[in-house]
Image (cartoon, rainbow, N blue to C red):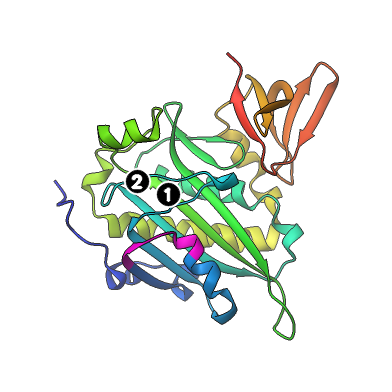
Amino acid sequence: MRDMDTLLSESRIAALRQGSAQQVAVEVVAETGSTNADLLARLNHLSSPVLLIAESQTAGRGRAGRSWLSAPGCALTFSLAWRFALPIQALLGLPLAVGVALAEALAQFDIRVGLKWPNDVLKDGNKLAGILVETMAVPPPKQGGTWAVIGIGLNLSVPDRLEAQIGHAVADLPWLARLDRNLLLAALLNGLTESLVQFESDGFAAFEARWNGLHAFAGKTVLILDRGQVAQQGVAIGVDAIGRLLLDTAAGRVAVLAGDVSLRVKD
């Protein structure tokens, strides 16, 4: 069994980088509030991609200001700052493409997951990983484009006390938690950077069919909530070429943009 005190290693992860990931600087910190917040604060001074990993995150964040709770050594919590030569509006489907990249990387370890629109990775119906993408336009006189900070929290093992604190069932990967986390993180980084290069070249259209093949709620009746109120109800069909969720409703087919809305399966 892997010693849970085994620390993540910048040099070991860096040595396992392949392809586009070789341009990414790897940094590991023992503890921080939020890896996303840390990288966002540094964007004006970055000239190349950076992967920031925290052994412990005390103020992890999810979408719409929600908290991401984890215990030291029991999750992978990391953020990747990546610069696109694209305007912000061209990154609409990026969180979904990241979900596909995570699912395909985990499949290398025989972990089969589903995707919940717009930014969750599920295992056996419960949340295994969350994705938070935050962006900042590169101002002139720099070369333009957009920085994206892609934050990911992936549960490896969830102690009972942590699940009680979260307040609902979550998924984890107990056997994968025994593996070398450096190897796992490198595999995720390699798959993620490969997908980011493809996204910049081909947009979300290159991921549409792959996302729909992983859609956890295909054919199910779902509710779209906006600030706790039901905004739409219908049968989830899948996503379109720019990442909008397609619902068949009583009034016909509608396309839902992410924004701050959330999805729930109708009881």
Disc 2 + disc 1, Cβ < 8 Å: yes
At 25% from the left edge and 45% from the top edge, which residue is drawn? 177
Residue 47 appears in the figure: no
Report the front residue among 10 and 21.
Answer: 10
Residue 32 appears in the figure: yes
Q: CA distance from mark 2 to mark 1?
A: 8 Å
The local crowd at label 1, few if under 14, some if 14 to 19, many if 20 or more residues have their Cα within 10 Å, is many
Residue 47 image point, x, y percent: 56, 81
Residue 232 image point, x, y percent: 74, 25
Q: Nearer the viewer, mark 2 or mark 1?
A: 2
The local crowd at label 2, few if under 14, some if 14 to 19, many if 20 or more residues have their Cα within 10 Å, is many
Q: Residue furthest bottom?
A: 141
Examine the image and state in which quarter residue 230 appears: top right
Q: Give the labeled residue for mark 2.
A: 70
Report the front residue among 194 and 121.
Answer: 121
Q: Of the residues shown, which amino acid type is indicated by label 1?
A: Gly
The magenta region covers 29-37
SS type, badge 2: loop
Examine the image and state in which quarter residue 245 appears: top right
Q: Of the residues shown, which amino acid type is indicated by label 2?
A: Ser
Q: Which mark is residue 153?
A: 1
SS type, badge 1: strand
Q: Is residue 154 above or below residue 192?
A: above
